[in-house]
C-alpha cells in the first residue's frame, strides 16, 4: 500500500457529496485506500491500519484543520508499543480549507482529486516526489474541566493564542462561508466600528449591539502572563499573542512568522498595544514585515508559555482549529514533518 487517505464527510466542502470516498478511491486505485473519519476519535484506528499496511503517504482530504488532526493522531499512535520505532509517513494536505497555509508554505497546488492523481502517476511511473521538511510545534496545555485541570499535548504549525488575532477567528468563522474576502470584511468592520465602540456614541439606543460592541470585543486586551525563553513579557494584558513554526500566508491578505522557516526556530509575536497602535501595524502584517514598538516582542524563540491570569481562559486557534478553556499552554520546537511537494496546476 502506497497511499492512505482520510476524508471527513462532515466537513463543509464534503457535505452533500456522498460519493466522496468512491471518487477518491477511483483515483488512487490499487495503490491506496480511502477511509471516512466522521469524528476525531475515528482517525487513530484508520492510521493504525495505514501503519500496519506500511503506507508511504498519508493524505488529509481537507485543509489545515484536517492536516492538524491527522498529525496529532498520527504522532500519538506512534507512541504506542506496537509502533515504536516507526516513523511518521509523508503527510500531504490537499487545499480543502478556507486558508490552507500549510500547503501554501510548501508550494502544494491543486485540489484533492488533482493532487492524488498526480501522486499516483508519479508512483506508477517511478518518478521522484520532492519532499519538504518543516518544523511542527509541540504544544503542552492544561484544560479546565468539571473534573479539574487536565493536561494534554497536541501539535501544530501556527497559533493565534490570545487577543485580537484569536478573536479575529471568532468573527471570521461567524460567516457562513469564510474565505479570503471574509478576512477583509472582518478587519474593515473592526476599523469602521472603532470610533463608535470607544466613544459616547456607543450609548446611543438606536445602535444595534452588533455595531456597538464589534470593535470593543475585537480589541479587548487579554490578561495573560507570557514568557519567552524564560523571560517574562513585562505587561499584564496583551492585545495579541501569536506563534508559528513556519511562515504563513492568510488568503494572500496577511503574512506572518517570516522568521520561522529556518530549522529549530519559532517566531513569536506578542504585543500590548492600543487598538490604534494595532491598526497602525496592518501594513506590516500585509507585507510580512517585522513589527516594532516598545510594547512589542517580535522575535525568534525556542519556547513560549502563555497563562491566563484573569477570568477569561485561553481559547487558542491552532492551524484553524479551536481549543477551549485552557489555563496554560506552552509551545516548543516539535518534530520535523516530511511533506511531499505535489503540484497539480
Image (cartoon, helix red, strand yellow):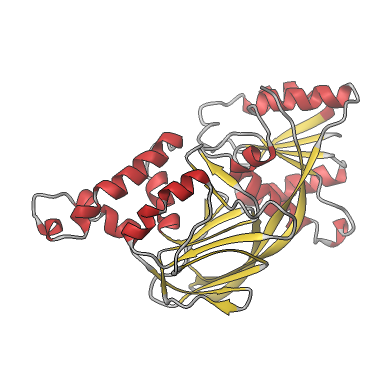
Q: Percent position (x, y) of residue 184? A: 38, 39
Residue 280 higher or lower than 1, as above or below: below
Residue 278, can we see it? Answer: yes
Specify the quadrant of the image occupied by residue 221: bottom left
Depth check: give the residue in front, 55 or 37: 55
Q: Percent position (x, y) of residue 132? A: 77, 42
**Could you tell me which quadrant the N terminus lies in?**
top right
Q: Which residue is drawn at 31% across and 58% down?
A: 276
Q: Residue at x 65, y 45 (%)?
A: 67
Residue 179, can we see it? Answer: no
**Could you tell me which quadrant the C terminus lies in?**
top right
Question: In the visual, does 133 lie left or right of 38?
Answer: right
Q: Percent position (x, y) of residue 295? A: 44, 69
Question: In the visual, does 62 lie left or right of 221?
Answer: right
Depth check: give the residue in front, 151 or 133: 133
Specify the quadrant of the image occupied by residue 305: bottom right
Residue 318 higher or lower than 62, as above or below: below
Residue 100 higher or lower than 16, as above or below: below
Residue 254 higher or lower than 181, as above or below: below
Q: Which residue is drawn at 47% across and 49% down?
A: 285
Amino acid at each position: 500500500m502506497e497511499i492512505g487517505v482520510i476524508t471527513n464527510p462532515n466537513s463543509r466542502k464534503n457535505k452533500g457529496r456522498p460519493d466522496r470516498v468512491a471518487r477518491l478511491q477511483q483515483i488512487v486505485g490499487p495503490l491506496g485506500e480511502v477511509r471516512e473519519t466522521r469524528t476525531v476519535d475515528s482517525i487513530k484506528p484508520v492510521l493504525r491500519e495505514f501503519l500496519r499496511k506500511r503506507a508511504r503517504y498519508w493524505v488529509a482530504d481537507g485543509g489545515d484543520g484536517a492536516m492538524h488532526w491527522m498529525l496529532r493522531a498520527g504522532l500519538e499512535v506512534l507512541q504506542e508499543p506496537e509502533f515504536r520505532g516507526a516513523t511518521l509517513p509523508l503527510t500531504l494536505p490537499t487545499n480543502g480549507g478556507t486558508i490552507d497555509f500549510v500547503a501554501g508554505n510548501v508550494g502544494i497546488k491543486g485540489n484533492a482529486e488533482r493532487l492524488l492523481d498526480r501522486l499516483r502517476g508519479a508512483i506508477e511511473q517511478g518518478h521522484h516526489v520532492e519532499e519538504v521538511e518543516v518544523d511542527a510545534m509541540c504544544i503542552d496545555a492544561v484544560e479546565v474541566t468539571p473534573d479539574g485541570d487536565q493536561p494534554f499535548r497536541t501539535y501544530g504549525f501556527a497559533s493565534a493564542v490570545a487577543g485580537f488575532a484569536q478573536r479575529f477567528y471568532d468573527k471570521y468563522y461567524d460567516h457562513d462561508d469564510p474565505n479570503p474576502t471574509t478576512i477583509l470584511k472582518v478587519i474593515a468592520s473592526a476599523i469602521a466600528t472603532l470610533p463608535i465602540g470607544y466613544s459616547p456614541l456607543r450609548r446611543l439606543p438606536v445602535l444595534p449591539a452588533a455595531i456597538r460592541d464589534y470593535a470593543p470585543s475585537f480589541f479587548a486586551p487579554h490578561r495573560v502572563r507570557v514568557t519567552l525563553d524564560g523571560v517574562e513579557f513585562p505587561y499584564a494584558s496583551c492585545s495579541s499573542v501569536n506563534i508559528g513554526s513556519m511562515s504563513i500566508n492568510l488568503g494572500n491578505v496577511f503574512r506572518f512568522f517570516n522568521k520561522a522557516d529556518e530549522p529549530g526556530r519559532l517566531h513569536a509575536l506578542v504585543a500590548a498595544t492600543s487598538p490604534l497602535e494595532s491598526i497602525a501595524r496592518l501594513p506590516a502584517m500585509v507585507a510580512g514585515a517585522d513589527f516594532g514598538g516598545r510594547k512589542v516582542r517580535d522575535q525568534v524563540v525556542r519556547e513560549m508559555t502563555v497563562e491566563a491570569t484573569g477570568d477569561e481562559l485561553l481559547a487558542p486557534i491552532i492551524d484553524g482549529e479551536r481549543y477551549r478553556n485552557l489555563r496554560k499552554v506552552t509551545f516548543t520546537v516539535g518534530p520535523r514533518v516530511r511533506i511531499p511537494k505535489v503540484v497539480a496546476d
